[in-house]
């Protein structure tokens, strides 16, 4: 079986390629290039990010590791599609008062989508693998599902939750049954990287608002009743649930509870105002199930770092509605609501609204 491995030059993808080769697969590496020299988007402050113009050191390291493992390595230019499908979408969502998750979008549209379409024009392969900490399994009902990783602290199933059944049918996650500490140990034994190698950063090594290409514009920070408490330099500098950095004084801690793009307003409220018992999501992708059991209690994450919360879930056309057994805080339009049944991703949708 031939496996194409997405390689970034970091520890995880390098060890993933090594483990697959050791297991007897015919392995080849691939790296997607996403920077456009004529891009209208600004250069990030840090070179240690997915979206960066200078990947020469990364590519040099990837080629070195590929040679040591004994595999061929290819690159594929995805810069045009990354700009239109990820960066343009990111800007559009932010300027509409939403809080998007570009990594989830990139995984669905680019890394496990367009990049593989481009790659198939170069060479045939049976599976695509990455260094993500997650697992994939074909269930008894015949559906494929992303499962949480053995290492709960490193689990990345949330970011892979929008992969389709077709995508999951040919995906391998060789690190899913390992602890991060075990992968680091393998890397150190092989000498791929120096001991204590830092983790890779987010997709953009800087302030996200730099990508919006919009000048600051004064607006009001208001309470839910319209009382003006202060001013801001643009609603896009804020996210739902934010508490720090508001720059206003009040008798109780305040949180951002909504954004009004049309009037350039940042609406704040006290902690109870951040609570939601019902969250609505659209544009759903279904994993372990194609519908929900009304009697089953699922667990749902409304952000990558939020704790899973118990809930009943029902399908609503192209999306679903989550009714939590207790309230959750800071549900933000644009973020992904990911539904789990035990360790498996049941469905993933884009949050469109919430009710207290």
Image (cartoon, rainbow, N blue to C red):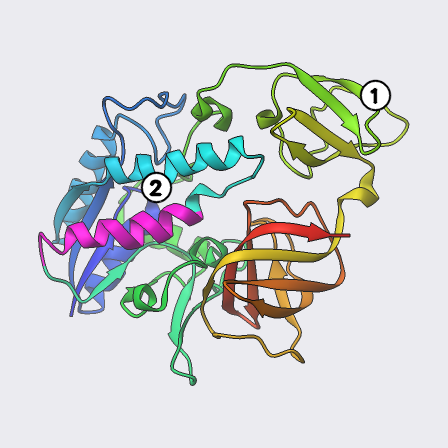
Residue drawn at x 21%, y 29% as measured from the top left? 56
Majority secondary structure of the magenta segment? helix
Taking 266 as reference, is 319 left or right?
left
Circle 2 Cα neighbour tier, 10 Å, few/some/many (<14 / 14–19 / ≥20): some
Q: CA distance from mark 2 to mark 1?
A: 40 Å
**Of tags 2 and 1, which is closer to the observer?**
2
Residue drawn at x 36%, y 50% as measured from the top left? 107
Indicate whether residue 122 is drawn in magenta.
yes
The relative height of residue 94 versus residue 351 in the rendered view (above or below) is above
Instruction: Compare residues 333 and 145 and report the one nearer the observer.
Output: 333
Q: Which segment did they paint magenta?
A: 104-123
Q: Which residue is mark 1?
A: 249
Q: Quadrant of the N terminus?
A: bottom left
Instruction: Compare residues 140 and 261 and report the one nearer the observer.
Output: 261
Q: Position of residue 237 (x, y in %)?
A: 59, 25
Q: Which mark is residue 143?
A: none
Q: Position of residue 207 (x, y in %)?
A: 50, 25
Determine the image quadrant of residue 41: top left
Going from N to C along the chain, the mark reached first, 2 or 1, is: 2
Q: Which residue is mark 2?
A: 85
- Secondary structure under tag 1 reads loop
Q: Position of residue 88 (x, y in %)?
A: 38, 34
Taking 180 as reference, is 52 left or right?
left
């Amino acid at each position: 079986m031939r496996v194409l491995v997405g390689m970034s030059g970091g520890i995880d993808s390098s060890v993933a390629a090594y483990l697959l080769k050791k297991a007897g697969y015919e392995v080849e590496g691939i790296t997607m290039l996403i920077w456009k020299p004529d891009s209208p988007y600004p250069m990030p402050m840090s070179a240690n990010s997915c979206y960066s113009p200078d990947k020469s050191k990364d590519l040099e390291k990837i080629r070195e590791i590929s040679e040591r493992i004994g595999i061929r390595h290819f690159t594929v230019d995805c810069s045009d599609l990354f700009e239109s499908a990820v960066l343009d979408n990111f800007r559009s969502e932010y300027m509409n008062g939403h809080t998007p998750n570009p990594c989830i979008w990139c995984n669905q549209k680019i890394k496990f989508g367009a990049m593989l379409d481009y790659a198939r024009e170069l060479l045939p392969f049976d599976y695509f693998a990455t260094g993500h900490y997650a697992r994939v399994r074909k269930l008894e009902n015949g559906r494929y599902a992303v499962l949480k990783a053995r290492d709960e602290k490193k689990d990345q199933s949330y970011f892979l939750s929008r992969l389709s059944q077709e995508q999951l049918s040919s995906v391998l996650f060789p690190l899913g049954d390992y602890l991060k500490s075990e992968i680091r140990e393998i890397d150190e034994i092989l000498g791929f990287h120096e001991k204590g190698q830092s983790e890779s950063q987010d997709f953009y090594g800087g302030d996200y608002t730099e990508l919006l290409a919009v000048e600051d514009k004064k607006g009001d920070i208001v309470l839910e009743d319209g009382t003006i408490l202060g001013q801001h330099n643009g609603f896009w500098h804020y996210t739902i649930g934010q508490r720090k950095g508001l720059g206003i004084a009040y008798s109780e801690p305040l949180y951002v509870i909504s954004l009004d793009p049309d009037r350039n307003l940042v609406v704040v409220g006290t902690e109870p105002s951040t609570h939601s018992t019902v969250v609505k999501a659209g544009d759903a992708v279904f994993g372990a199930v194609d519908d929900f059991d009304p009697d089953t209690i699922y667990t749902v994450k409304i952000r990558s770092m939020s704790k899973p919360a118990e809930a009943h879930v029902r399908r609503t056309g192209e999306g679903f509605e989550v009714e939590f057994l207790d309230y959750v805080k800071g549900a933000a339009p644009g973020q992904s609501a990911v539904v789990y049944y035990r360790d498996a991703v049941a469905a993933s949708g884009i949050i469109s609204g919430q009710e207290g």
